[in-house]
Image: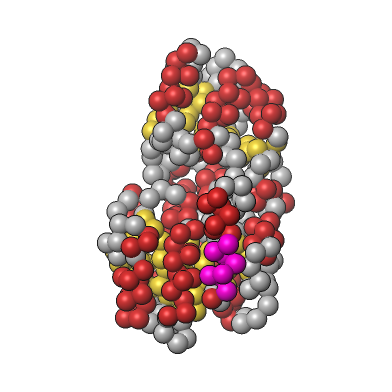
Amino acid sequence: MSALLVVASLGVGGAERVVVQLANELASRMPTTLAVVDASGPLHDLVDPTVDLVDLHAGRVRSAAGPLRRLVHARRPDLVLSSQTHVNLLTAGLAPFAPPGVRTIVREAEVRGARSRTERAIRLAHRSLYRTLDLVLASSPWMAEDLATRHRGRIAVLPNPVDVPMLRAAATGRPSTPRPGRRFVHVGRLIAAKGTRDVLDAFTAGADGQDQLIIVGDGPERAGLEALVAARGLTDRVRLVGLDPHPSHHVADADVLVNGSRTEGMPNVVLEALAIGTPVLATDDLVTLASVADTFPPGALRQVPRSELPAAIAATPRLVRPDAGGLRPSLLPERHAPERVVDRLLALLDHEHGDVRGTDA
């Protein structure tokens, strides 16, 4: 058996991290190719040497149809698996032209709305192009049910893989920064959908005078956020540290990770924080996260209405980090281990018919 995985880039997004983790684990079991529309990006170094990394040099997803089709016919993999909306539409469109025996699977990474013209177009494309697929993967039960409203084929829940040992190794050994108050951390691209402004507002209203907020990420809202921090006189307590492809040490040094996203498929930053042992405070907008909340240990995840973020920040307890740069125990369930996730994926491939929507790996 062999596998071909497809992703748009090796940027710092959650979908890219998931595909890299899947490729690395699959490569330990079978010949695995990772095809990337544009293989530049900081996650390049995370791709295991056993993975055959192919740069399609297409620049854009819409230009990758020819190179990807030729690659599928040349390699003739048993499995083609993609993630990210536009890449999924591409692989679904190419599925009828694949050699006999090639099974095409897509992993949905985003929650689809129906408000904008683009979202309505994507929903329509799902109904038509997804008919060609052997299986559609969702990262949570809620997403699986949402997909079922526009896709009548096989749908299964596959947890996001998280390389816990790698994350913890990256965060271990860094001395904890002495501080008198609590430390909050927010990680994500600085765009409106990530709710960074809401996190800053909640910190301003709910934190104590000695607390700190570390904002990790970059994006179009950075200049406005920096101006707001200065206007509020918070430059000594709020730091925007910029993009860090491997922010585990920032997360490990925090009392809680605050996620203000308005909508996401399954936020990898939340899973990675739990793996490092840092609990999470998130808004209840993240319905996908709420649908798996009961799989986490008590106290690992708090979800509150967005209007209650200041009060939740005020109520956050201060945690003790072990000495000598150690870490708190992982809070992430074992089902997210890459080997368990791939076990489930291969088991799904053995079942040719029927929906499989449970979350057990």
Q: Quadrant of residue 173?
A: top left
Q: Is residue 360 left or right of residue 92?
A: right
Where does the magenta region start and end? 124-131
Which of these two is toward me, 351 or 251? 351
Outermost residue on the bottom side: it is 100
On screen, 191 above or below 311?
Answer: below
Q: Residue 215: x and y, percent? A: 47, 31
Q: Is residue 125 magenta?
A: yes
Q: Main secondary structure of the magenta part?
A: helix
Which of these two is toward me, 297 or 1? 1
Q: Residue 16: x and y, percent? A: 43, 55
Q: Which residue sits at x=33%, y=49%?
A: 42
Q: Residue 55: x and y, percent? A: 29, 63
Q: Is residue 70 left or right of residue 335?
A: left
Outermost residue on the front side: it is 117
On screen, 259 above or below 272?
Answer: above
